[in-house]
Amino acid sequence: MHATASILATALLLLPLATTAGGREAAGTDAPPAAAPEARPDAAEAAANVAYEVVEPGTIRIPAGTYMPLYGAGEAALEMPAFTLDRRPVTRAEFAAFLADHPAWRRDRVKRIFADEGYLASWPATDDPGTVVDAARPATEVSWFAAQAYCQAQGQRLPTVDEWEYAATSAPEGVGAATWKSTVLAAANRRARGAPAPVGSGLAGAWGLRDLHGLVQEWTMDFNSVVVSADSRGTGARDRGLYCASSARGAADVGDYAAFLRYAFRASVDGRGTTANLGFRCAGG
């Protein structure tokens, strides 16, 4: 897809603008050097040998506020109403419980129009998420349709791109915006290949949220909104610039390399697609 190539090329070209050789952000900020990517063992080895924090499920009320999307240059910041967001991603164990109540979404029964051949491919059986450690991993290899069905079964929905980005780019209390951006980039760089670590292994963010960075990518309601909205203030209209190879032109922050990667990833997937590093969490009203 030419959009994906354009955004990835943009991200790679902008990397030198995001940091200097010493690791400090450019444009005269006083941010401390970004943490060097840590050596990370194979995910299976880490899960077997390293204790992890068990992050309990829960829903966080995200307060109203303002937010400048990546492709919002020249516009006023968006006014975001309050909404709810799961504290951390849905786990394999939780998705297995959903399958028990909604067997049409099992690997052996799901309609191929709703999920590709990779759907839940690593599960030992159609209703078995695996070992205790495996069950604590985020539910990946799940299509957009299945993720949305799960959230609807909980009386929720997937978050919009703007909701997800607002929550993810908001720095935790006491952390400066520039420092948070470099921390997020370091987490993206050291995301493990292969099976993701259990939930709770990613960054702790604002409002007590966990794992928005450093664990898996996450589905959003309108990941493909380029063909949905004609509103100049909506995500769809902003994304048209991405699909027209306009590169960094119009980007609110050309140094936010991690955000470019997120937008590129969203541009590369389709609703029935599944990958080992794509999970989800639910949002509400």
Image (tube, rainbow, N blue to C red):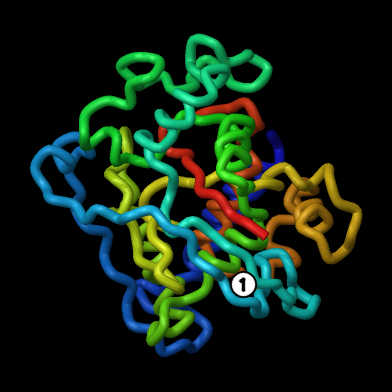
What residue do we see at 52% from left, 74% from top?
Answer: 170
Q: Say if 48 sits above or below 234 in the image.
A: above
Residue 137 falls in image quadrant: top left
Say few, some or many: other residues with alpha carbon within 10 Å of mark 1 (under 14 / 14 to 19 / 20 or more): some
Q: Residue furthest left?
A: 49
Query: Can residue 197 be seen by looking at this rendering?
Result: yes
Kindly identify which residue carries mark 1: 253
What residue do we see at 36% from left, 72% from top?
Answer: 21
Residue type at tag 1: Asp
Using the image as rendered, state which of residue 197 and residue 284 is in the foreground: 284
Where residue 272 appears, as percent x and y from the top left, is 62, 26
Q: Secondary structure at mark 1?
A: loop
Q: Residue furthest front?
A: 101
Q: Say if 168 sits above or below 22 in the image.
A: above
Where residue 225 appears, as percent x and y from the top left, is 76, 47
Quadrant where the image shows the N terminus: top right
Q: Residue furthest top?
A: 108
